[in-house]
Image (tube, grey):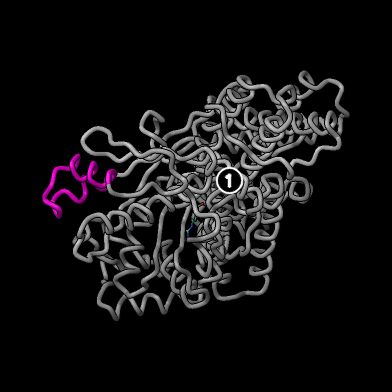
Amino acid sequence: MREFATFEERLSAWTTEAMKSVFDLGGCDVNLGVSPTNNDKFGDYQCNAAMVLTKQLGKAPRQIAQEFVDAAPLPDFVSKIDIAGPGFINFHLSNDALAAHIQALENDRYLGTEQVGEGKKVIIDYSSPNVAKSMHIGHIRSTVIGNAIDRLYRFLGYDVIADNHLGDWGTQFGLMLVGYREFVNEEALAASPVEELERIYVASYNKSKEDPTWRDLAKAELVKLQQGDAENRALWEKFIELSIGEFNKIYDRLDVKFDLYRGESFYNDRLPKMIRTLEEKGLAKESDGALIVDLEEDGMPICIVRKSDGGFNYATTDLATVESRIEEFDPDRIIYVTDERQQLHFRQFFTIAEKIGLTANLVHVWFGLMRLPEATFSTREGNVIKLAALLDEAESRALEMVKSSSPDMPEEQQKDLAKAIGIGAIKYTDLSQNPQSLVTFTWEKALNMEGNSAPYLQYAYARISSVYDKYHAQFPDSDLSKCSLKIEHEIERRLAIKLSRFPAAVQAAADNYRPNIMTDYLYDLAQIYSSFYQNVPFLKAEEGVRESRIRLCRSTARTLKQGLNLLGIETRERI
Ligand code: ARG
C-alpha cells in the first residue's frame, strides 16, 4: 500500500482480503469496493460486498454481512463495523487513525493524492480561438474549463501538453488579404489589432456580397497564399502574430499557459495524404464533386473531407492533427474542450479516425454556452461583450468590494486583491456548474460573499490564515510539531474526514472532466470549517487542544489553497 493511501484504498484492500479469509471465494479475484457515505449515521465508509457475493455464496446478504463482521478482526484504523439495511457493511474510522492520517498528510506535497498519471501523456486541446477574431465569452469556457482540466491532470502526475489549436487557416484569409490592403487603418491596428482585423474582415465580406470581382480577387489571393506566395504569407503571418499577441494578454490575465500554439495550418502538408488514406481504405467517395465519408451506418450524417472547390475541411485537418500528434507524442489520451455545437464534428472525426486505425483515446469534453443577462454569446455574431471588458468589469466590481471591506489597506494591495477576486469569480462561476448545463452569469452570484463563489472561498482561506497568524502572535514560542493532532469533538471529526477525501475529489473531477466536483468539494470543506470555527474555541482552548486545532486549521487552509489552485484561482493570506 502506498505511503499516503486513502481510507477508501485501505478499506477496499482490507475488505477484499478479509472476505477471502472468512469465505471460500474459490480463488476468484474479487475486488470489493468501498465508498464514502454521505450520512455519518451509516459510518464513514460503506461496502456492498455482501450483496455482490450473495449469488456466489448462496446466502442472503445480511447473513453474509453478519458472518463477516463476526469472524473478521477489526482493522486497526476502524473503531466499529456495523450492518445496515439489506446488508451494507458500515465502517467507522477510529479517531486516532484519522488524526494520524491528517497529520501524515501535512508532509505530502499532493495531500494524499496518488500520482496515477506518472508515465502517462495527455494532450489537452483547449481555448483554440480563431485568428483575426476577438476571443469573446464563448471562448472563455474552453479556456477556463480546459485549464482546470490541465491543472488537475498535471497534479495527478500526467505529462500534459496544453495545445492551443488556433483557427489560423481557411477561406476567410482570402477576404482578409484583399480587405487588409484596401481598408486597413494603421492607427487602429496598432491600438487594437484584433478589433481592427475583425473590422477589415467584415468590410471585405460585405464588399464581396455586392461585388463579384472582389470575390474573385479574394479567391485568387487565397490561392496565392496556399501556394506559398511570399507577400501573402508574410501578411498572413502578421495576422497570426497580432492575434496571438492579443490572446496572450488574456491568457496572462487568466494565468493560462500553453506548451504549444499549433494552429490548423501546421497540419496543412498532411492533408493530401490524409485524403489518400481515406480513399485507400475505401472510406472516401465522390459526391457532387466533393469527397465525403458516409457515416450512415454509424448513425451520423456524411462528413465532407474535401469540398468541391478542392479545399479541405475542418474534419480533415482534425484527422491529420490526430495522426501528427500520435506520431510525435504517442499520447495516452487527447482531450478536446469546446462548446456543445461541435459535438457532431468530434463524433464524426473520432469515428473516422478509428476506422483508419488512428487508435488514440480521444475524448471530447463539451460545455453549454454561457448566457449573460445582456446577451447570449456565440461565435461570429455581433453583439458580443468582449472578454477583456468582462474581466475589466470583474476587477473593478471586486475593487469596490475590497475598498469597502478593507478601507485601510494600501491601494496597491487592494488592486492586487481585486484582481485575484474578480478573475477568480469569473472562473469559479464557470467551473462550479455542470459544464454541460447552460450557465446564466450574474454578477450577484459570481461575487456573492455568502454563497458558493470564489470570493466566499477566498475569504474563508484568508480568515483561516489570520487565525493562524493570531495564534503565532499570541504564542510566539510554541512549536506545533511538538503537539500531536487529536480528534475528539464531532466537528473536528467531520473536518478531518472531509480533508481526507481531497484526493477522491481531485480524481473524480479529472476522471469525469468536471471541475465542478472540485468546487463542490471546496465549498463543503469551507462550510464544515466554518461550523468548526463557530462551535469550538481555538485560541482560548487549553494547551494541546489549541495546537491540535491550529493544525487542523492549517491543513484546511492548505487544502483550500491547493484546491483553488487546481481551478486556476488565486488566494491571498490577507483580505
Ligand atoms: N477553432 C475552433 C473554434 O473556435 C476550435 C478548435 C477546437 N479544436 C480542434 N482540434 N478542433 O471553434
Look at the picture and state if 439 lies above or below 320. Answer: above
- Above or below, comparing residue 308 to residue 390 in the picture: below
- At a point 43% along the width and 52% down the height, the residue shown is 10
- Residue drawn where x is 22% and y is 56% of the image: 23
How many numbered circles does the render carry? 1
- Name the residue rendered at 62%, 74% in the picture: 229
Q: Nearer the viewer, residue 454 or 231?
A: 454
Q: Is residue 51 magenta?
A: yes
Q: Give the residue at mark 1.
A: 100
- Quarter holding residue 559: top right
Residue 203, how many percent across, how many down?
60, 46
Q: Main secondary structure of the magenta part?
A: helix
x%, y% of residue 118? 53, 66
Please identify the quarter of the rendering in which residue 410 is found.
top right
- Amino acid under disc 1: Ala
Q: Is residue 393 left or right of residue 128?
A: right
Report the magenta residues as a range.
Answer: 48-70
Is 269 covered by the magenta stretch?
A: no
Nearer to me, 130 or 238: 130
- Residue 442 shows in the view: yes
Q: Position of residue 499 (x, y in %)?
A: 55, 40
Indicate the secondary structure of the residue bearing disc 1: helix
Q: Is residue 134 visible?
A: no
- Pick the quarter of the image with the C terminus: top right
- The residue positioned 31% from the left and 61% from the top of the image is 303
**At which x and y percent is residue 463?**
71, 28
